Amino acid sequence: MRVFYKFLFLVGLCFSSKTAFANGIDAIINGWLSPISNKIAGTVFYSFSVAGADIKIIVLWLIAGAIFCTFYFNFINLRMFSHALDLVRGRYDKPKAKGEVSHFQALSTALSGTVGLGNIAGVAVAVSVGGPGATFWMILAGFLGMSLKFCECTLGVKYRIINSDGTVSGGPMHYLSRGLAEKGKAGLGKFLAIFFSICCIGGALGGGNMFQANQSFQQFVSVTGGEASFFADKGWLFGLIIAVILGFVIIGGIKSIAKVTSRLVPLMALIYLAAGVIIILLNISGVPEAILRIISEAFSPTAAAGGALGALIIGFQRAAFSNEAGLGSAPIAHAAVKTDIPVTEGLVSILEPFIDTIIICTITALVIVLTGMYDERGDLAGIALTSAAFAKTIPWFPYILALAAILFAFSTMIAWSYYGLKSWCYLFGYSNLSENIFKFIFCIFCIIGSSISLGSVLDLSDSMIFLMSVANLVGVYFLAGVVKKEINTYMSDLASGKIKRTD
């Protein structure tokens, strides 16, 4: 452990000479990656224009999966919502069941990977570009995503592997390889599992780590004096501090991660939501008008960029980017749950898009519209617009928002370290050495992310994150029938009294 942190410190020192080393690496990385990144990103995020709205193929792929699961499972997101709440509250828990964490801890870990800067900055971008009407479509996309999340997370538990030491390994790489082998498509399953794992590792190191560290550093500097801040030219030092804290958390494995996220995520979300609710209550007289505006502009041909279709596309894109339904990341966290019935965690997972998109993203959008900042935004966008909207009612809240953004980013890094680790171990073997190598690499990338501009690195990692959905949804379509049998059996056992509450 001491050697690990000493090495982290030495790496940090290497980045302390900003112009000589960090900027040099920056130029080399971006110069080398730029042609590759541009080609891949251009393909993954290929879009075509309809009525002035740019429609991304990858977003349509995710929307199609969400719609399919919603109808195929007969609106499971509505029918079993209250039961999902009972499950996450532990009312059907079996302490002796195989697994590592509780339903609540698994949900918190998965939420830590989705609830973050996208809820604060991404929603502001969606409303700025697509108008208030984008909020309506964002909510609908979150609703549909609940059913897709149910399917993939049930599969995550169904095909997980319980290792000899009691630890769990699960996620798309396992249900792609094992599940498709049951369907007589072992070759395809193995290929997709490897493809998913490679993309997940790239996404974890980039979007799930470097981007989060970089944005955290920018937020930290902005509230500590801007260019006059002591840390303004010391991204390496900020990254080193975050890397050491991160190392303490992730070295302990999923139990340590779950322990931190089960406290950190609810606390962050409650602070943010409480401020949002206060602002809404203080402007309660304007709520009906704001809601009517959101609904009317969702269907209005005079809505922002691209009209009603533009609002729809932007809303669906924001929801897909925020709650990650269909990407295959969440099943890795949910697979660690203590349960002998896979479908129970699938049901718990429907709460994830509900909390992330329908509640948090909606409150952000409402605050921006209610406070009048949407109409007065000028050049403000992203987190600056959200911050200004909150500050209009609570002047000192930008400081809290900056802290929340940093903590949100940190929790996202924790979750993605686990996603990347499980994909790494799938490719290179499950051993202490293999795990420690990845954790070490992950911490190093945290320092790098804080020290350089991301450029092509971010474009490439974003592409890899969304390429995960290509492999994952193939598995969802092939194995949806397996999940349907699971839920039908479970509901039958509930009705017959075979499954009883334990509280």
Image: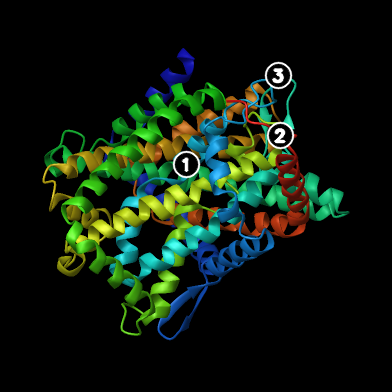
Residue farthest to the front, as pictured: 496
User: Mark 3 belongs to which amino acid?
Assistant: Asp
Q: Callout 3: few (<14), some (14-19), or many (20+) C-alpha neighbours within 10 Å?
A: few
350 or 81: nearer the viewer: 81
Q: Which residue is mark 3?
A: 165
Residue at 13% across, 50% down? 393
Real-space Cα distance between discs 1 and 2?
27 Å
Relative to 329, residue 380 above or below: below
Relative to 404, residue 379 above or below: below
Q: What element does badge 3 sit on?
A: loop
Q: What element does badge 1 sit on?
A: helix
Label located before the other in sequence (3 or 2): 3
* Image location of residue 218, percent across then percent down: 26, 44
* Image location of residue 484, percent across then percent down: 74, 53
Q: Determine whether, in the image, residue 403 is placed left or right of residue 461.
A: left
Q: Which residue is mark 1?
A: 111
Q: Determine whether, in the image, residue 3 is placed left or right of residue 467.
A: left
Q: What element does badge 2 sit on?
A: loop
Q: Determine whether, in the image, residue 160 is placed left or right of residue 281.
A: right
Label located before the other in sequence (1 or 2): 1
Q: Which residue is mark 2?
A: 499
Residue farthest to the right, as pictured: 184
Q: Callout 1: few (<14), some (14-19), or many (20+) C-alpha neighbours within 10 Å?
A: many
Residue at 47% across, 24% down? 259
Q: Determine whether, in the image, residue 428 is placed left or right of residue 79.
A: right
Q: Callout 2: few (<14), some (14-19), or many (20+) C-alpha neighbours within 10 Å?
A: few
